[in-house]
Image (cartoon, rainbow, N blue to C red):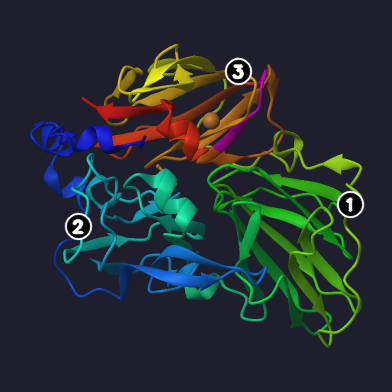
């Protein structure tokens, strides 16, 4: 079973979008000419990788490592990334998860490009318009590719004059490998010495293809300063709060380093995470007891300036009902994950025109959570279960829990054909995938 491979069978929808006279080709690709500010080469290749547990696994990697190299760039820069596929037989691409790039640069095999086969090369070029925490991963049979390691961090720093050079900026990606974790640290717990008084930004990225991860920060009050790469407005200072981060989602955690130890770890008996203290030494605190409160993004921060809100006039109103059922799919009797009762490719295709304001109501009638990921756009979360969201919360990977109803809205400002799917990649491969298409 694979997720997006159905589309490889000649359904090259990007070319049909190109032929639409209302959409010019220049909007669908990044700048094809001009000297890039930053150039990277990523080679998709098999490698044997040692996990934090000490176990070795046969992995699929970018440049022989998991995660792949961290791409750290500045907002406004023109980026050129060359993908070489050395030996991944099913092919590979690079999708820039959460960064709203032009459609042809989005890296979805069978939709925006062909899968890059062994010996082949593909070049992505785009201007990084948004600052924030993103990640990249292959989008050819993503369930298998992401699980096996084809991913890395993509950090877009704000323009130089907005940056505080004193900030200690750290990325922590966590990934599960059949019950064993691969963390972006060399050991189960990485130790770091940080001088007291230093402002710290900890970028959490959950790259798991299945598990919603529970993190706890012990030793200091903190703020959740950004969700899915977008800054929150006046985030509150909290502590002793469990951070549940859905697959594909990101939280930026900020705090000022105290003169006592701080530990960011995955809750539970396993000691996994990042230990920080003035000299890097000290005992790792026990974070196996779950914090009393769980972070709730819907009731956090305060409302900042927003381009639209719940009372705006919407040009389109869509409803997505998420559920599951038993049935045959790809020749197997299985648990299927449905949108409006259907599995891909029979799921609805939402049609929009450029410039329209679109509201979507997402309802989870099933028994498990669904992190819904919309490519190419950011959704402003308007309400959860009928209650308006307190702060200004933009999401690209929204964790919709069983029984939840969310209202979200976005501006259709990025023409093309876009994926909208569950980022539990097992669910995506078992039907929970659809498209957003510009007329
Ligand atoms: Cu992170 Cu369509 O994926
Ligand atoms: Cu799901």
Reading the image, the residue beneath label 2 is 117
Quadrant assignment, res 3: top left
Residue 142 in sight in this render:
yes
Viewer-proximal residue, 434 or 436?
434
- In the image, what residue occupies the spot 46% across and 71% down? 48
From mark 2 to mark 3, how far is it between C-alphas? Answer: 37 Å
From mark 1 to mark 3, how far is it between C-alphas? Answer: 30 Å
Q: Which residues are magenta?
A: 398-404
Q: Residue reaching furthest bottom?
A: 279
Above or below: residue 329 compared with residue 381: above
Reading the image, the residue beneath label 3 is 366
**Dot 3 crowding, Cα within 10 Å, few <14, some 14–19, many 20+:** some
Viewer-proximal residue, 15 or 12?
12
Image position, residue 70 (x, y; %): 47, 71
From mark 2 to mark 1, how far is it between C-alphas? Answer: 47 Å
Reading the image, the residue beneath label 1 is 240
- In the image, what residue occupies the spot 49% across and 60% down? 131
Q: Residue reaching furthest top?
A: 341
Image position, residue 348 (x, y; %): 34, 17
Specify which label sits upstream in the sequence, 1 or 3: 1
Is residue 47 found left or right of 402 in the rendered image?
A: left
Residue 158 in sight in this render:
no
Q: Nearer the viewer, mark 2 or mark 3?
A: 2
Image position, residue 72 (x, y; %): 46, 72
């Amino acid at each position: 079973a694979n997720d997006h491979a159905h589309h490889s069978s000649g359904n090259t929808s990007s070319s049909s979008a190109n032929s639409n006279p209302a959409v010019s080709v220049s909007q669908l690709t990044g700048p094809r000419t001009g000297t890039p500010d930053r150039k990277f080469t990523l080679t998709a290749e098999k490698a044997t990788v040692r996990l934090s547990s000490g176990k070795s696994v046969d992995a699929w990697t970018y440049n022989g490592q998991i995660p792949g190299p961290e791409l750290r760039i500045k907002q406004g820069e023109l980026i050129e990334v060359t993908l070489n596929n050395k030996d991944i037989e099913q092919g590979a691409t690079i999708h820039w998860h959460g960064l709203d790039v032009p459609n042809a640069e989005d890296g979805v095999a069978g939709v925006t490009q062909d899968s890059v086969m062994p010996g082949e090369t593909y070049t992505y070029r785009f201007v990084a318009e948004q600052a924030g925490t993103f990640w990249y991963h292959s989008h050819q049979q993503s369930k298998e590719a992401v699980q096996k390691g084809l991913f890395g961090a993509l950090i877009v720093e704000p323009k130089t004059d907005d940056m505080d050079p004193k900030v200690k900026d750290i990325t922590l990606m966590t990934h599960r490998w059949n019950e064993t974790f691969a963390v972006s640290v060399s050991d189960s717990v990485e130790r770091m010495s940080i001088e007291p008084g230093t402002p710290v930004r900890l970028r959490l990225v959950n790259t798991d293809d299945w598990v919603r991860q529970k993190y706890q920060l012990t030793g200091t009050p903190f703020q959740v300063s950004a969700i899915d790469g977008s800054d929150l407005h006046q985030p509150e200072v909290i502590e002793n709060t469990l951070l549940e981060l859905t697959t594909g989602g990101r939280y930026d955690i900020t705090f000022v380093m105290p003169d006592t130890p701080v530990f960011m770890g995955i809750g539970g008996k396993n000691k996994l995470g990042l230990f920080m203290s003035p000299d890097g030494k000290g005992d790792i605190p026990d974070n196996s007891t779950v914090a009393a409160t769980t972070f709730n993004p819907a009731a956090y921060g305060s409302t900042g300036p927003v381009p639209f809100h719940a009372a705006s006039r919407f040009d389109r109103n869509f409803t997505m009902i998420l559920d599951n059922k038993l049935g045959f799919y790809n020749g197997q009797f299985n648990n299927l994950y449905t949108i409006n009762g259907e599995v891909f490719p029979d799921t609805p295709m939402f049609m929009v025109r450029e410039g329209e304001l679109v509201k979507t109501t997402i309802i989870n009638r099933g028994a498990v959570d669904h992190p819904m990921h919309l490519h190419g756009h950011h959704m402003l979360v308007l309400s959860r279960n009928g209650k308006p969201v307190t702060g200004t919360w933009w999401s690209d990977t929204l964790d919709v829990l069983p029984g939840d109803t969310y209202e979200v809205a976005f501006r259709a400002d990025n023409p093309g054909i876009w994926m909208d799917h569950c980022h539990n990649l097992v669910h995506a491969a078992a039907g929970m995938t659809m498209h957003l298409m510009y007329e």
